[in-house]
Amino acid sequence: MDLTLKIWRQENAAAKGRFETYKVTNISPDCSFLEMLDILNQQMIENQITLPVCFDNDCREGICGMCGLYINGRPHGPDKGVTTCQLHMRKFKNGDTIVIEPWRARPFPVIKDLVVDRSAFDKIIEAGGYISVSTGGVPDANSIPVPKKKADVAMDAAACIGCGACVASCKNASAMLFVSAKVSHFANLPQGKVEAKERVKNMVAKMDELGFGNCTNTGACEAECPKEISISHIARMNREFFAAKIL
Amino acid sequence: MTKLNSKIPQGPLADKWTNYKATQRLVNPSNKRKLDIIVVGTGLAGASASASLAEMGFNVKAFCYQDSPRRAHSIAAQGGINAAKNYPNDGDSIYRLFYDTIKGGDYRAREANVHRLAEVSNLIIDQCVAQGVPFAREYGGMLDNRSFGGAQVSRTFYARGQTGQQLLLGAYSALMRQVHSGGVKLYTRHEMLNLVIVDGKARGIIARNLVTGEIERHFGHAVVIATGGYGNTFFLSTNAMGSNVSAAWQIFKKGAYFANPAYVQIHPTCIPVHGDYQSKLTLMSESLRNDGRIWVPKKKEDAEAIRAGKLKPTDIKEEDRDYYLERRYPAFGNLVPRDVASRAAKERCDAGYGVGSGLAVYLDFSDAINRLGKHVVEERYGNLFQMYEKIVDDDPYKTPMMIYPAIHYTMGGIWVDYELMTSIPGLYAIGEANFSDHGANRLGASALMQGLADGYFVLPYTIQNYLADDIQTPRMTTKEKEFDAAEAEITSRIDTLMNINGKHSVDSYHRKFGLKMWDLVGMARNKEGLEEALSTFKEMRESFWKDIKIPGKKDSLNPELEKANRVADFIELGELMARDALQRQESCGGHFREEFQTEDGEAQRNDSDFMFVGAWEYTGEGKEPILHKEELVYENIKVAQRNYKK
Ligand SMILES: Cc1cc2nc3c(=O)[nH]c(=O)nc-3n(C[C@H](O)[C@H](O)[C@H](O)COP(=O)(O)OP(=O)(O)OC[C@H]3O[C@@H](n4cnc5c(N)ncnc54)[C@H](O)[C@@H]3O)c2cc1C
Ligand code: FES
């Protein structure tokens, strides 16, 4: 396949960014999207054209949440239920022009090119995304039975990889799907009940403080989430939140 | 030989750890606050250690190269974690887990360490459940178990196909709780590049801030290396792109011994290589071997027709399929340990029975789907099947998966004693970065167990035995001459790299080197190949330092510079791996020397000459490293030839 790439280039956080156009040829449809970018970078280095494009990635199998590109106006591109690293070129056509941008959201400032700073997510977890147990002195694992259904819902929520696609897809840059996934994961487990109220209050307060927007129920986050996390978790979090406020 | 003191406590095996804990020195709470510990790595080992140490009251500085600790490579582990809970009532016990691990490791691991691992395994599951890790459950609400290779009991706990993710998120949440309380200071997007030793003790590190390029100095009363394995030496592996040996390699060059570098695990069930642009290999969890059956065609002409695209796997009749693992190893069948399964696949493919490109075998779920129904298979392996389909563009519910062995895990690593201390006082290595518990081959679901055992339950105790002497040692300013020198080494190395200005990208070099590693130091090794490796790698190392091109600047985010730093270390490590493989004139576990096999092609150990841990000491640039031997003594297990046939 031969492709035209329009890629966002930005020296650093302070610099002004711009789109640059590059061409790649002879790309195999079995190549992954990031491998296609590797090929582009390889050409740039060996032919001394320009600086290679910076993009975050690590596991390249859809689980670490490190990669995340805004491809043709969609986080992680056109395929459903995958991260950028799992996107394959067979989803594009020969001759296509592909526009590649970083996540665009105020709480995720650009570091360089396509790399953004998502440490705001860590700060939200730091504010309460845990059960306060220290190492040692806990009961036998099977002394806390958990109904299978509940455990399954908790697992569905816990599958979030923290990539930030939900924020990038939301016109308000809301982090509600991310936060609610963690809240819901714990709220479904007996172990998480003890601190449920404090947790949701602290995490929501932190989210607001960091400049994430409000949720207006557009549902773009659910549609773009590579792990297909359901917005029903947002409803659950809202219930938890109001219950916590009332009491 | 005299130089290695493994510090194994006296007394009967089952009492060693209890006795150690009862008599070791501790640090009292007010003194803990005065002590700083650097933990490099936030994977299962590093995150669990950092959290536990901070909970105890130590000041922890935690480093990782990703943008968040939650993204450490442990996140990718799929299948599960072992523990000797015996919940299924199938005869499991601490002794049995200990025994299986020693046997699976082909009698090349320390008894005392492995027994301790089995002892603490149950605590790990309790801890994780208390943290809210959503393990799979049965309808009664109790925890579910599955089986993994090398065991005849079901002792593996799992969270769908994302066990590593859930365990890491558990450890990460414990870590973030300590960040919140101020016990841990986080340094993300930081890479450790050097160790600082003062008066013979580890006292700090030099790290590069990957965003600004700044070279930073950090002091710690002790330093813990939890930086994972070195599988990426081979370029193509199941490891994350950034997984590296650099921290381990730099401490090796500062005097920490590197043990058993030749012991590399090749995982039997990975998606086969499909193109020369490929950047990594994807694992299909071993848990699939619970329900999937591995086969190739019985007739060569069928295999040829499949490769030519004239036949499909579903065209091959049952009686024309060779379920070679079930045939060769009736007692364990598809659940033989990884090294055995990998070699058997290679044997069939080398003999001309491979499918796909010729380097692939089938992993077939049709029996399981008929027996259990598609929904059960989907519930157990849904995300793995989806992953396979996304990569290969083929539906594994309908046609069998194609798999082939790939580099996956490294049993070798930094030598540590029973306390997990390296040969440098005050320097520790935990998780995959050390060599300690898996001998020559690791059983499935035991790496997660070891990482968390080290981090939650072993290191936080043993490190106090050392720090008890340090309560009077004031914090250093990092202005000391040892810090100056360590930093100067790094700035000069980076300048040299930036100024090479050659023609080739680091990746192209790594790829070339990795292929040579796979050919010469891979699944099957021999004397000629290893000698060739030694000379070739030396040449490659020299040309690397003349030939590579790093664009951009050193004082900004520069992934090419990061890669160059790592690949330079991989090439040096490659030499040591070849040297170790050459030295070990026997086949054991993941190390297979073609000269040493039985008539029916099984690995042949040589216990009288090689029942030792081979720990290498660095002696300087261009000089041969020295091999130290730690004799392995088996007092509680009868050493036998591994037999998975009966
Ligand atoms: C695909 C896959 C599946 C697996 N499945 C299983 C399984 O089902 N069961 C099982 O038991 N095991 C499994 N394993 C093995 C297991 O996941 C690993 O052995 C284990 O997670 C390693 O944990 P760790 O904490 O030692 O290191 P890692 O998780 O690799 O963490 C390394 C840490 O060190 C940091 N780091 C590295 N270098 C530097 C540096 N120079 N400076 C600063 N920081 C650095 C990284 O940022 C990271 O935080 C699997 C492995 C793979 C690849
Ligand atoms: S690189 Fe890990 S999710 Fe894409």
Image (cartoon, coloured by chain):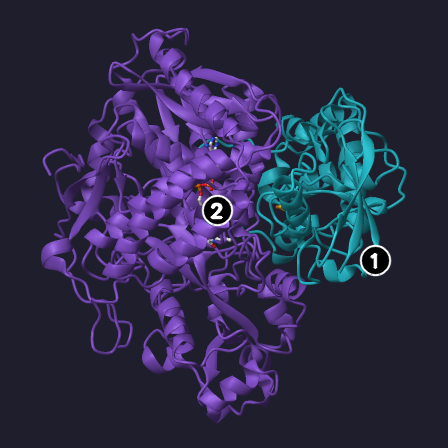
State the residue at coordinates (54%, 89%): B316
Q: Residues within 10 Å of mark 2 (few under 14, many from 20)?
A: many
Are circles 1 and 2 on residues that touch, CB within 8 Å? no
Write down the quadrant of residue B396 in the picture. bottom right
A52 vs B73, left or right, is right
As drawn, B570 above or below B356:
above
B104 vs A243, left or right, is left
User: Badge 2 sits on which subunit?
Assistant: B
State the residue at coordinates (76%, 27%): A107
As drawn, B141 above or below B457:
below
SS label for mark 1: loop
At which x and y percent is residue B280? 54, 53
Tell me the amino acid under the disc marked 2.
His
SS label for mark 2: helix
Q: Residues within 10 Å of mark 1 (few under 14, many from 20)?
A: few
Report if residue A138 is visible in the image.
no
**In whole angstroms, how far apart are the C-alphas of marks 1 and 2?**
31 Å
User: Badge 1 sits on which subunit?
Assistant: A
**The color chain B is rendered in:** purple
At which x and y percent is residue B166? 56, 46
Q: Which residue is mark 2?
A: B510
Answer yes or no: disc 1 within 8 Å of ligand 2. Answer: no
Tell me the amino acid under the disc marked 1.
Gly
B522 vs B504, left or right, is left
Tell me the quadrant of the picture where the C terminus of chain B can be found.
bottom left
In the picture, one chain is cyan; tell me its letter.
A
Q: In front: A113, or A41?
A: A41
Q: Which residue is mark 1?
A: A95
